[in-house]
Amino acid sequence: MKKEKIAEFTRKISQSNRSELIVVIYDVYFVCLSDARDFYQNKNWDDFKESVRHAQRAIDELIDVLDFSYELAGNLYQIYMFCKDMLAKAIYARQLTEIETAERLMRKLYESFVQVARQDQSKPLMQNAQQVYAGFTYGRDELTETCQDFTNNRGFLV
């Protein structure tokens, strides 16, 4: 994953509530699979394997946040484990068909979580994070974001 993407995800995480954080994890998953496809095309097998493993770790994060007091969590767990197994097969078979199958399933779930995140109006999990404002200025080719820190006390309060 490129440094720009890592910085973008870091910013999104700092500004996200619980529902939006799940969407960010899905986004990380899809970027990892996209990277894996690129490495596959270039026959760069070590980086291909590493990117698929990063996608598996994203699935692990999704599994870790499941609340099994709800029946739906059991169904999501089975889907996540199936996708994780498909990714493992993709590593050892060096084929994209398994990756495409796992991505299709996760895309359907992703759309549902995006809808939930739109309805969730709770506050961001990180209360003392830097505020990011987008749109005040524009770069030559992209939107410029500005971070303003009016306090010296950022991050978690202990």
Image (spheres, helix red, strand yellow):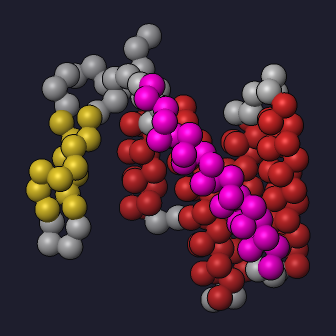
Q: Nearer the viewer, residue 38 or 49?
A: 38
The outermost residue toward the left is 137
User: How far from the left and from the top, in percent, is residue 97?
Assistant: 80, 79
Q: Nearer the viewer, residue 7 or 100?
A: 100
Q: Is residue 52 visible?
A: no
The quadrant where residue 76 appears: top right
Q: Is residue 81 shown left or right of residue 7?
A: right
Q: Nearer the viewer, residue 151 or 112?
A: 112
Is 27 situated above or below 157? Answer: below
The quadrant where residue 19 appears: top right
The residue at the point 65 percent across, 68 percent down is 33
Is 61 situated above or below 139? Answer: above
The quadrant where residue 152 appears: top left
User: How far from the left and from the top, in percent, is residue 69?
Assistant: 81, 22
User: How far from the left and from the top, in percent, is residue 6?
Assistant: 46, 55
Q: Is residue 12 shown left or right of residue 101?
A: left
Q: Is residue 14 shown left or right of residue 31?
A: left
Q: Would you say the magenta stretch is mainly helix, strand or loop?
A: helix
Residues rendered magenta in the picture: 97-122
Q: Is residue 77 visible?
A: yes
User: How far from the left and from the top, in percent, is residue 51?
Assistant: 66, 66
| Number of dots carrying numbers | 0
Quarter of the C terminus within the rendering: top left
The residue at the point 72 percent across, 50 percent down is 59
The residue at the point 60 percent across, 45 percent down is 113
Q: Is residue 102 magenta?
A: yes
The outermost residue toward the bottom is 42
Is 121 situated above or below 112? Answer: above
The residue at the point 86 percent across, 37 percent down is 74
Q: Is residue 48 magenta?
A: no
